[in-house]
Amino acid sequence: MSNTFGQLLKLTTFGESHGAAIGGIIEGIPPGLSIDFDQVSHEMARRRPGQSAIASPRKETDVVEWLSGIFEGKTTGTPIGFLIRNQDQQSTDYDHLKNVLRPSHADYTYMAKYGIRDHRGGGRSSARETACRVAAGALVKQYLKTQHIDVRAWVSQVGSVSMSQPVALDTLYLAEENLVRCPEPETAAKMIAHIETIRAQNDSVGGVISAVITGVPVGLGEPVFDKLQARLAYAMMGINAVKGFEYGAGFAAASSLGSQMNDSFEIKSGRMITTTNHSGGIQGGISNGMPIDFKVAFKPVATISKTQKTVNLKGESIDLAAKGRHDPCVVPRAVPIVEAMAAFVIADMLLLSKANQPLS
Amino acid sequence: MSNTFGQLLKLTTFGESHGAAIGGIIEGIPPGLSIDFDQVSHEMARRRPGQSAIASPRKETDVVEWLSGIFEGKTTGTPIGFLIRNQDQQSTDYDHLKNVLRPSHADYTYMAKYGIRDHRGGGRSSARETACRVAAGALVKQYLKTQHIDVRAWVSQVGSVSMSQPVALDTLYLAEENLVRCPEPETAAKMIAHIETIRAQNDSVGGVISAVITGVPVGLGEPVFDKLQARLAYAMMGINAVKGFEYGAGFAAASSLGSQMNDSFEIKSGRMITTTNHSGGIQGGISNGMPIDFKVAFKPVATISKTQKTVNLKGESIDLAAKGRHDPCVVPRAVPIVEAMAAFVIADMLLLSKANQPLS
Amino acid sequence: MSNTFGQLLKLTTFGESHGAAIGGIIEGIPPGLSIDFDQVSHEMARRRPGQSAIASPRKETDVVEWLSGIFEGKTTGTPIGFLIRNQDQQSTDYDHLKNVLRPSHADYTYMAKYGIRDHRGGGRSSARETACRVAAGALVKQYLKTQHIDVRAWVSQVGSVSMSQPVALDTLYLAEENLVRCPEPETAAKMIAHIETIRAQNDSVGGVISAVITGVPVGLGEPVFDKLQARLAYAMMGINAVKGFEYGAGFAAASSLGSQMNDSFEIKSGRMITTTNHSGGIQGGISNGMPIDFKVAFKPVATISKTQKTVNLKGESIDLAAKGRHDPCVVPRAVPIVEAMAAFVIADMLLLSKANQPLS
Amino acid sequence: MSNTFGQLLKLTTFGESHGAAIGGIIEGIPPGLSIDFDQVSHEMARRRPGQSAIASPRKETDVVEWLSGIFEGKTTGTPIGFLIRNQDQQSTDYDHLKNVLRPSHADYTYMAKYGIRDHRGGGRSSARETACRVAAGALVKQYLKTQHIDVRAWVSQVGSVSMSQPVALDTLYLAEENLVRCPEPETAAKMIAHIETIRAQNDSVGGVISAVITGVPVGLGEPVFDKLQARLAYAMMGINAVKGFEYGAGFAAASSLGSQMNDSFEIKSGRMITTTNHSGGIQGGISNGMPIDFKVAFKPVATISKTQKTVNLKGESIDLAAKGRHDPCVVPRAVPIVEAMAAFVIADMLLLSKANQPLS
């Protein structure tokens, strides 16, 4: 199922970085949803290269052409086909890489697996594919909105620069007010400076995206293999450059005691809550109604302008310095990708829960 | 697909902690594999409660009854049904919990989701279900052995006690020589002491399991959503009490530079390798032939004997102190579970790769 | 997915004819369903060998042992594991067949596919596996009953003996009042006589099972590949010995005109109906609220006592006359299998429709 | 999975009859296949409306735009996205049908299921979607050709006109030499005359397509639910207007004896064959190396120019006479659709068998 994500709400994508187009098919969005196309454009702009001084200068207008499944502005319940033409295909930029196996890229593994590859811009392995996820995710987020569910992500770490404290939900909007998408304005400034320094060094740097999902009803997620956190982890680890995932207390739980980690139940305003939320909104693999929070670690972009040792297709040792356009730090542009994938997981599990209601 | 794991190599499990039996169905193991049943028993013993002074005293013989799919000692290619009877069903131990929603357990979420639950020992949410994974995993590991693939896990952290340095592959066997399954004998002793201290405090403690998979051919894993790391993360996050997953450089990559993280290719003894392995054996979602390594964070067991505040089914605030048998630290027993799930992922992707060979 | 049927309501089966046991795992039955175990036994008795003078004399008590997913008589929403021990394992009956490739059996194809097989009683290819479908189907039918959906099948043809006219829904109960399960008493008598004649000739004979599903709400089935008729056909053609499937007007539609076949809509008692039902209750792959009717053709049982030419594993030409116990005509015992599989399809599509409701 | 067909070789389609475009995504075709685009155009022409005097006059050039997954003329193993623009969108033809529920069409069931529909030309329920299957099937047939597998279909019945005898494989090419695609030239002439008569009566007529698949290796198909015939039936019953499926002896087997139907094995030229082929090339759900043959019954097209009684969205009884363009008999154009779907089933099972090889 490598190109399809989801069980009831599904996205299947196609396309290479420098082919004619990328696109996909969305299935399972309930019929009758009015689509806000401006909102889609807004999400695309958040991911688009060339959006700011700290992103790749590749120019893509990323206009989504919707081909089916929407009639007179509303979803019809039939599959939604869409297309994004590749415009800034400077394919000759990649001629010198035709026979090169770039370090920590997918060149070698694709050649070994398929015996053939579209070398231009990484072909299918390019993060350009994620534009499809953001386009589709924009629709899914609109669906979730009708269910009062909100998915928000932000940059909490860039290289050595981290946020100073946990974010308050009501200040999250600040993340969208700076280039790096960090809701702490001062930290954001430091992150931007850090990225600019790294770029000046012809290098790249990693980072962490944090996310929170609010409004999730109790009962989403399936016991055993399809725990809600398992589906979220699967979704996040399927994003390019992601190296780690944790939810709730995460890795810190490993060095903690049960008495510190357990979340006591209490009734507040007639509603069951937990006093703390080390569980990250999920218990036994099932949402408990508290906010679901998680973190995703990204490695530095593998493409750097520094000279590196590597090997070509003939097995000869060579020196390589990237000429293509690339991001010094991918995390600001990855924020809408994380949101899109999380939205897909939640909406899929929400639909599944509708099919699994107890007999009354 | 909540009770089925895998696409071509599949495990479907059933069973509650204190029902008649747990069991499962394994599909996709190639026909003609000779089964070593002693090896299965050995794996079961590694997971079994009551195996040592630092584990839960619940007594389960965990004898696996194989019901189909094996003829004259060999797999036939048909589904392998198996059964593990629940023996030490001290169900009355759980009578006092019938109406209690234990903190950080699945009591509340199951009731909300299903409107009904088998409260005894956590029912389906109990880690007892993982005995099925270990039984099935034992067969899968035997299959992988015929392909020269080896999956090994060990405890690298218990609470505040961590291993002092990365483990060498040739000392991994030491992990099985102590109760806590840590390959550094001195650290193991400290971990055991730490667990005993925690238990004396009626508390529990978390930990980290590390794993390495060797002998994996180049080319396993699928681009986009089914990246090998995404499948591994999904598998690990589906294990009870797991809070985080990372592979290769993991979260540390977030604070690193591209020039530090990139793995240069080189040819050694006629074989493509990378000089370093920050990629953790996976590039672009596809195995590159280097060892695949990852880490899994476990929270402390939620069941503790300390008194905690919680709520009962009527919504009344109550005090709770566990009476059931439980582990002060689950990671030593979880080592074979991590191995089993990793084995399933690799074997599934291996079978998939056989279907995806390039035309010659 | 060869051993799993269904998408949301799923049955996975295991087991060989003469192994320790057959059994399965049922997933997706909504929690809170009270199980009538007598009804299960009744369904098992309808399929059981040895039930009458015209069925195989193999003795199987076919007692279903329920292992999980049912608590205090009600489904819990967790997987329902079950087991049926094989009792009358006269395996030595099959020693003479170990090296024989029986005509129109699966001996040759299994050997070619798997390189190994459990030859006793056909192993996995035996229709004994369908006992699991009937056991599981009995639960599904109970679920459908809570939704006012009824699945009924009967024998409409045995060899050259066919029913004289279409059956009226209110006389369908007559089918269960004779050995051959035909609702026309006089035709039933002829069918029984026909079967007895065939058996006396050491031969076997085919037949047709007809079915009708009433109470199906409008809207079940998915356009394109998962049309309701496609799922029904898939379900029926997966039953041993089935050679053909048709619904509504079926093959007769091929020689008809559009003006004869089209079903006019009309409103009757405030409800949309069609004046005729050549559509068999399905239009555009989706149920239209009219009764769903279909027919399933069964070939004669391949096992006959007449001497036949065939080949052994060495490729030598040999003569074969069956010694095992077998049915001269399988259709009377296949009636509950057809019902079980149809129930699975409808219930699966019903659950799916709950997840696909339009936004209001 | 309503819009996706297949397990390892997959086709997902989108698109409505009168939307911007139809299209799809093909996954799983092995990398390295050289594509013959002329052959694709040839297949499209076989299905295209307006191709002859006995087909719908709708004009569609049906040019397939390939968007990804093919590099320098060869498949790369990544998903193949493609698009077919809708050109002859005479949508105003359908204004008068906006509120009409046409007899034996999907208008009513779509409205009931989705609460909204694109009424133009039947929207998603239109057989226009099958153009995607033919485009994708053209690639799959090219893949099968590299495996020496050939899928061929022809018209064996139109209304009351049937072929006089079973077709010989070496005369099948004759089917493509006449408008109705029947390999008996004299019968073809009668069929064409029959269709023209029916059209003159403002009516439509049904028919039967027969097919044979040669070169299939022994061992394709899975026991139990995914028998090869079950997958074929599912594929065929998912084609618009299909009412029945049978393989091998089919419905005729129901009135036959075991001694007539059993296929004796024999060794011929060192190869296992069966003397007869009532089994239709499949035993126990698995291919036995003999030709696989089956038949598919099509109802008459529901759109007829004769006046019919029906109901509109307000529930009022109305008279309706079709004004849109339509086929008097769909079977000649459905021949490449049957071939495409059969090719998908065989190729999918072939890939699956590669993953399931016995250990040597």
Image (spheres, coloured by chain):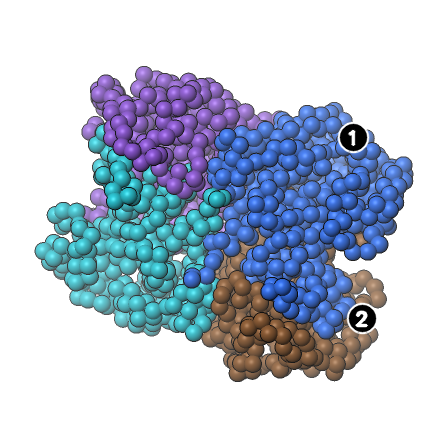
Chain colours: A brown, B blue, C purple, D cyan
Circle 1: residue type: Pro
Q: Position of residue B93 (x, y in %)?
A: 76, 27
Q: Position of residue C317 (x, y in %)?
A: 27, 32
The answer to which quarter of the image holds residue C244 is top left
Local secondary structure at mark 1: loop
Local secondary structure at mark 2: strand
B52 relative to C154 in the view: left or right: right
Circle 2: residue type: Val
Q: Position of residue A87 (x, y in %)?
A: 51, 80
Residue at x 59%, y 74% (from the top left corner): A316
The answer to which quarter of the image holds residue C110 is top left
The answer to which quarter of the image holds residue B291 is bottom right
Subunit that carries the residue with mark 1 = B
Tag of residue B57: 1
Query: Between A221 and D140, which is closer to the camera in this rendering?
Result: D140
Q: Residues within 10 Å of mark 2 (few under 14, many from 20)?
A: some
One can see residue B48 in this view: yes
Subunit that carries the residue with mark 2 = A
